[in-house]
Image (tube, rainbow, N blue to C red):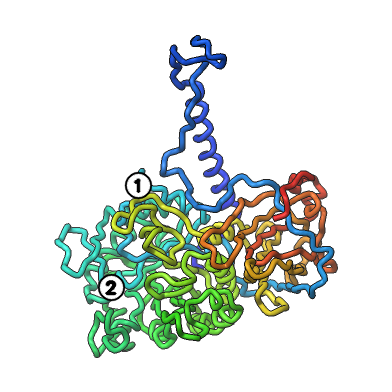
Amino acid sequence: MTHDRTNAPARPSNRLVWIASAAAVIIVVLIAAIVFSPRDSTQTGPTGSGTASGAATPTPTEPPIAEQLIVPGYDPTPGNFALPDASNLTATPVTANFELTDDATEWGGIYGLSFEATELANPAWNSDNSNLTTTLAALESPVLRFGGNKVDRRMWWTSTDEPAPEWAEATVTPADLERVAAVAEAVDAEVTLVVDLGHNDPERAADMVKYATAAFGEHLLAITIGNEPNGYSPEAQPDLAVRGDDWDTDAYQDALVEYSDAIDAETPGTDYAGPGAYDTTWLRAYTESDLPNKTAVTMHWYPLWRCDATSNQSSTTTIENLTSPALRESAHKILGLGKGVADDAGLPFWLEETGPTSCSGGNETSRTHAQALWTSDYVFTAAEIGAERIAFHSMLGACDGGAPMSPVCASGSVDEPGEVIEGRSNFLALMLLSWVPDGQVLTPTVSGDGSVMVHAVYGNDGSLTYVIVDMRDPGATDALAPVSLHAPDGLGADAPAAWTPNSGSQLASDALDSTESTLPAMAPVQAELAAETLTADAPLTVASTPGTTTVLTFDDARAHDNGDGPTASASASATP
C-alpha cells in the first residue's frame, strides 16, 4: 500500500482506549442509576412491613445505541482460552510450515467493506441514532470503498441542489460526504471512491472528487473512474448497459484521460486506482493507458458466480463448493492473474470488491457459518497471493429479507431498514482476524487435502500468530485433527529463538449450514497451553475442531521468562 503502517502499536492502543472509554461510560451510568435512582416512600420493605427503609430496585441503563456493538454470537468476556488435548490423537498430523519472503504482504488494516455508492446518502453515517461507527471500529482500521454497479447507474451527485434525473435512486451531496468522512476519521479507515463513468460527465465527477478530497483528507486513498467498465456495453451486459456498441478498451482509455483532465483541473495530483474489473484485458487497458498518478491495479472477484443451483459446477452457489479446497486453488489462479498484471506495471494489487457470490437474492450459502469460515480463509489466501486491500461488498439493507451476503445489515424491515446495524457470522470472522497483530503475512506450505488450512503472521513485535481454518462439517464428524505448527523460516538473526502461546479465540458453530456462529473475545490461554514452547527444532501439535477458525498468538518466550507473559489460570474454561 502507499501509506506507511510501520507504527504497529497505534492500532491496538487505539482499540484498548476505545474499549476502556466505552466500559467507563457504562460503569458510570450504572453507578449513577444505583446511587440516584428515586426511592418510593411507600415501597414495601424486605419483610413486608410497609416501612420506607427498603430502596427501590434500580433499573440497569443501557448505553446509547451509537455505542452498542450488536453482533449475535459474540462474547466480549470469555474465560481463559483452551484447546482440546492433542496428545492422544493418532491421525496423521496436518503439517504447517511457513516462510517469510521478501515480498510478504503487510498485515494490518488491509481488509474491510465495499458499499454501493448510493449508500453514501444513507442517514446511518455519523448519526446519533446509529451504531454504524461502533460496528466498523470493531474491524480495526478497516478499508472502505464506495462504488458498485449503482455508481454508474443509480447515483446522482450534486453540489448545487440540482434536481435528480429519473434514473437516480439516491442523491449524494457534499454534506453526505462529510458525514461518511467523520466515520472514516473515527475508525481510522482508508477510503477509495468510484465516480460515475457510465453517464459520461467528467465535470460532475471532477466536482465530486473536489468535495471528497476536502471531506476525507488523508483518509482518501484513491479515486476510481467507473465501476467494472468491461460491463458497460449492450453486448457485455444487456440489462446493465450504459454505453453504446462502440464501447471498448480504446474508448475506456480515452475516457480515463478525459476524466482525469477534468478532475486534475479541480484537484491537482489526484491518485487513481483501477479498473475495478475481473477481465485481465481491461486490467491491462488500465495499466497501459495515459492516466496519470496510477496508484494500484484493482480487481473484482466472486468465486461462486453460477446462480443456477441445479448446475453441477465448482462455481455454483453451494455450501459444498464454498468450503471446498478447490475454491482456494481457484483464488490462486484467478487472483494470481490480476497480481501478475499489477506486478508487470510495478503497482500494488487491490481486491476492491469481492464476496462469495455476485448472484442476487439468497442461496444455500447465505448467512451461514460456512460463509464465515470461507471469509476467514479467503482473507488470508488473498493476502498470501499479494492483495494489499480486500473489500467485501456490503450493503446497509435489512437483515431479514435483504443483503443476504453482506457482513453487516440493518435491524429494521426491508422497506424501512433503519439505522441500527448488526454484524452477521461473516462479520464475526472479520472481527476475529482484526485481533491478529500487525506484521507480515507468511507463505504457508500445509499438508493434507486442504480441508484444514493454516495461515500465519509474523508480528512487528516479534509475535507469531497462527490461524487454523477447519472447513470440515461439524455436523458430519467430531474427529479432531492434529495440526503440527512449525516455526517459520527466513525471519532473520534478530528473531526470537522460541515462542510460547499467549492468547487465543475460536469461531465455531454446530453445522456448516447453521445461521448462528459463536466468537469469544481473545483471552489468555489456559495454564497448560501457556507452558508449551515452539522453536525451530520443536514444533507444537494442537488439535483442530471441525467447523472452526482458531487464532492462536505466540509471544517471544523471553518475555515470559521476564514475567511479562500472559496471566494464565489453572481454572481455565472448559475445552471448546
**In the image, is 8 to the left or to the right of 311?**
right
Residue 191, located in which quarter of the rendered image? bottom left
For label 2, the crowd category at 10 Å Cα-Cα, with few meaning under 14, some 14 to 19 and many 20 or more, is: many
Q: Which residue is mark 2?
A: 152
Q: What is the quadrant of the C terminus in the image?
A: bottom right
Looking at the image, is 14 positioned above or below residue 308?
above
Position of residue 38 measured from the top left corner of the image (x, y, whole percent): 44, 19
Position of residue 34 measured from the top left corner of the image (x, y, whole percent): 51, 24
Q: Which amino acid type is shown beneath numbered disc 2?
A: Asp
Q: Which amino acid type is shown beneath numbered disc 1?
A: Ser
**Residue at image point 24% right, 65% down:** 169
**In the image, is 213 to the left or to the right of 82?**
left
Position of residue 99 measured from the top left corner of the image (x, y, whole percent): 71, 73
Residue 220, located in which quarter of the rendered image? bottom left
Tell me, for residue 127, which label it has, or none.
Answer: 1
For label 1, the crowd category at 10 Å Cα-Cα, with few meaning under 14, some 14 to 19 and many 20 or more, is: some
Tell me, for residue 25, which label it has, or none.
Answer: none
**Residue at image point 59% right, 70% down:** 377
**In the image, is 222 to the left or to the right of 107?**
left
**Cα distance between the residues tagged 1 and 2:** 27 Å
Residue farthest along the left direction in this orientation: 163
**Residue at image point 78% right, 56% down:** 500
Position of residue 526 measured from the top left corner of the image (x, y, whole percent): 75, 50
